[in-house]
Amino acid sequence: MVKRKTSGDNGSDVLPKGMQVRLDQLRRKLLQLHKILLDAERAAYEREHGRKTSGEILQLLINHEQFAWLHRISEFVVRIDEILEDEDPSDATTDAAILLTEARSLLMPSETGDQFGKKYYEALQRQPDAVLAHKEVAALLSDG
């Protein structure tokens, strides 16, 4: 397990504890949102192509264009992990602030936006659970 630096550790520019907590909460909420969106996308795919195993779904998630839009959320989770696990986060506070701004921008559903925005908008129209998860993520992104 990697020790996360806090504002009490030595170092000139470390990630403040409040930011660590916020990023950790955001990470969990994004994973919940991603699962809801993935489950919905899987159901749509299986309606057309028949039932798939978990392994087949993993391959589809990685390689199939129907699931490609979900990569954007996965990438955010990875970026959060990198910031939280960095043992020498010289620019961690700045990186975290940039990440939060980018997340706010990404998670704006749009009927006329980019591929992610459109797919996200459509998912929110069909999935009440996705709307609730979106609200939780949006609340974290609007704090501070």
Image: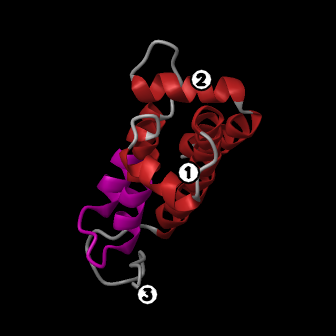
Asked whether the residues under the numbered discs 2 and 1 touch, taking CB atoms below 8 Å apart as contact, a structural biologist would say no
**Which of the marked residues, 2 or 3, is nearer the chain's N terminus?**
3
Residue 30: numbered disc: 1
Relative side of 9 to 107, left or right: left
Q: Is residue 80 magenta?
A: yes
Camera-near label (2 vs 3) is: 2
Q: Amino acid at mark 2?
A: Glu
- Helix or strand or loop: what does disc 1 sit on? helix
Closest to the camera, between mark 2 and mark 1, is 2
Q: Quadrant of the N terminus?
A: bottom left
* Vertical comparison of 24 with 123: above or below: below
| Segment tinted magenta in the rendering | 76-100
Q: Of label 2 and label 1, which has the lower sequence position?
A: 1
Query: What percent of the width, then of the height, locates residue 4?
Result: 41, 79
Q: CA distance from mark 2 to mark 1?
A: 18 Å
The residue singled out by tag 3 in the image is 1
Q: CA distance from mark 3 to mark 1?
A: 22 Å
Residue at left offset 42%, top offset 77%: 6
Residue topped by disc 2: 122
